[in-house]
Image (spheres, helix red, strand yellow):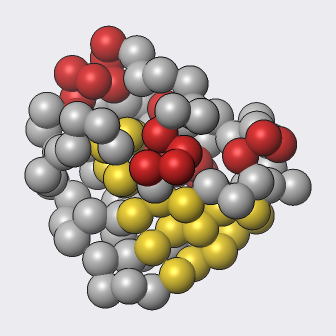
Amino acid sequence: MPRITFITSAGAHHEVDGRSGITLMEAARDNGVPGIVADCGGACSCSTCHVYVNAEWSTRLPPAESAETGMLEFAWEPDPARSRLTCQIIVTDDMDGLVVQVPERQI
C-alpha cells in the first residue's frame, strides 16, 4: 500500500496509506488530513483539494487534463509546475513515498 505524506502549511506531516485505485483526495479525507476541504466530493468542480506536488514527483505523476488545469485557475496561489487537484490523481503502487504540500488555504 503506497505511503503518502501530506505536509500542512504549518509544517505538520500527515503520513497516510493510500489504497491503489482511490484518489489522493479520498486518502486525505479518509485519514483526516487538515486543509483538504474537497467541497465538490471529487467532481473536479472546485479547487478545495489543491496541493503542491513535491518537485521530485511532479514529472512522475500523470499529467493534468484540461478540466483540472482550468479549475486550478481558481486555486489559492497556484504554481504552474507543482499545483494539482488531489481529486484528479488516482493512487497507484508506484506512488509510494509521494509528498505533497497543502496550501495555506483553499478557496
Q: Quadrant of residue 5?
A: bottom right
* Quadrant (top left/top right/bottom left/bottom right) for the C terminus: bottom left
Whole-percent x, y for residue 101 in the image: 40, 64
Whole-percent x, y for residue 28 in the image: 55, 61
Q: Quadrant of residue 40?
A: top left
- For this view, does 77 lie left or right of residue 30? left
Q: Tell me the residue at 34%/43% (across/down).
A: 82
Q: Tell me the residue at 70%/59% (across/down).
A: 97
Tell me how many marks there are: 0
Q: Tell me the residue at 51%/68% (across/down).
A: 6
Whole-percent x, y for residue 61 in the image: 57, 33
Q: Tell me the residue at 33%/25% (across/down).
A: 68
Q: Quadrant of residue 47?
A: top left
Vertically, is 10 above or below 56? below
Vertically, is 34 above or below 55? below
* Quadrant (top left/top right/bottom left/bottom right) for the N terminus: bottom right
Q: Nearer the viewer, residue 71 or 93?
A: 93
Whole-percent x, y for residue 35 in the image: 35, 69
Q: Nearer the viewer, residue 89 or 46?
A: 89
Vertically, is 61 above or below 19? above
Which residue is outermost to the right?
A: 1
Taking the image as drawn, is residue 30 in sight? no
